[in-house]
Amino acid sequence: SQQGEEDPQALSIQEGENATMNCSYKTSINNLQWYRQNSGRGLVHLILIRSNEREKHSGRLRVTLDTSKKSSSLLITASRAADTASYFCATGGSRGSTLGRLYFGRGTQLTVWP
Amino acid sequence: GAVVSQHPSRVICKSGTSVKIECRSLDFQATTMFWYRQFPKQSLMLMATSNEGSKATYEQGVEKDKFLINHASLTLSTLTVTSAHPEDSSFYICSARDGVTGELFFGEGSRLTVL
């Protein structure tokens, strides 16, 4: 990928279980974002974590960032069948002309079984 | 909320023809739009940055003569795949950056199939 790797590539769990996805990136960053993509659809922004933050929460989502290891994780707690989707991390420019120019990881395909 | 519309959502064309995909910001002005390509079960690859009123900036390895980008207004960017071949079949997604707030919004994507 242009940006880095994610693992696992695929994750299959039962409803109610937690899902953890990891992302590694290559360059220094100002922030890292996580997106969700339902099959054949556009992207939905989930959460942004800045480089000076270590952890961030949003509802059932928890994101961590370790800049020393150039890695991030996304935890979805109490998963639901509706959480079934592909999840991507993305890094990119955060200022000036590069703002919005994102590089995505390979993604994790999450399947939550009812 | 802000919406970015892509049209067409699906297109099938014959090899050798050109296909135009539109990306519109519906309720905000987008000074910058971005085009991505996504092959099945793969990640999104940034193709180019489209700036209103100026030439697009292409990522390394993306043929600018093959993928023509025009950003003629603050609400519309177009991607034209010229002389399309089966290997150009892909899912093309645009994003648009609100010139006032800086927020970024993605379109729903356009699936191109070249026969």
Image (cartoon, rainbow, N blue to C red):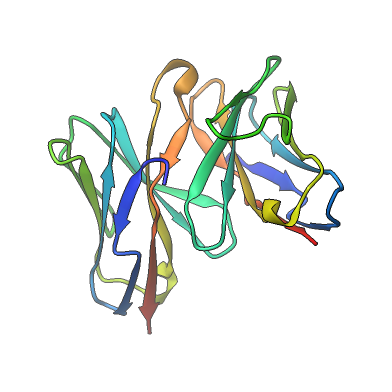
User: Residue furthest toward the bottom?
Assistant: A114
Horizontal and vertical percent for residue A68?
12, 36
Horizontal and vertical percent for residue A94?
38, 25
Residue B77 appears in the picture as rendered = no
Residue under the image location 76 percent in, 52 percent down? B85
- Residue B37 versus residue B67 in the image, above or below: below
Horizontal and vertical percent for residue B36?
57, 42
State left or right for residue B3 relative to residue A92: right
Instruction: Report the front residue among B42 and A47.
Output: B42
Residue under the image location 71 percent in, 28 percent down? B75
- Residue A39 versus residue A68 in the image, above or below: below
Residue under the image location 42 percent in, 41 percent down? A2
Looking at the rendered structure, the number of numbered marks drawn on it comes to 0
Residue under the image location 49 percent in, 17 percent down? A97
State left or right for residue A41 relative to residue A110: right
- Residue A67 versus residue A105 in the image, above or below: above
In which quadrant is the C terminus of chain A drawn?
A: bottom left
Residue A31 position by quadrant: top left
Residue B90 position by quadrant: bottom right
Instruction: Report the front residue among B86 and A36.
Output: B86
State left or right for residue B96 relative to residue A78: right
State left or right for residue B30 relative to residue A8: right
Horizontal and vertical percent for residue B18?
84, 43
Residue A84 appears in the picture as rendered = yes
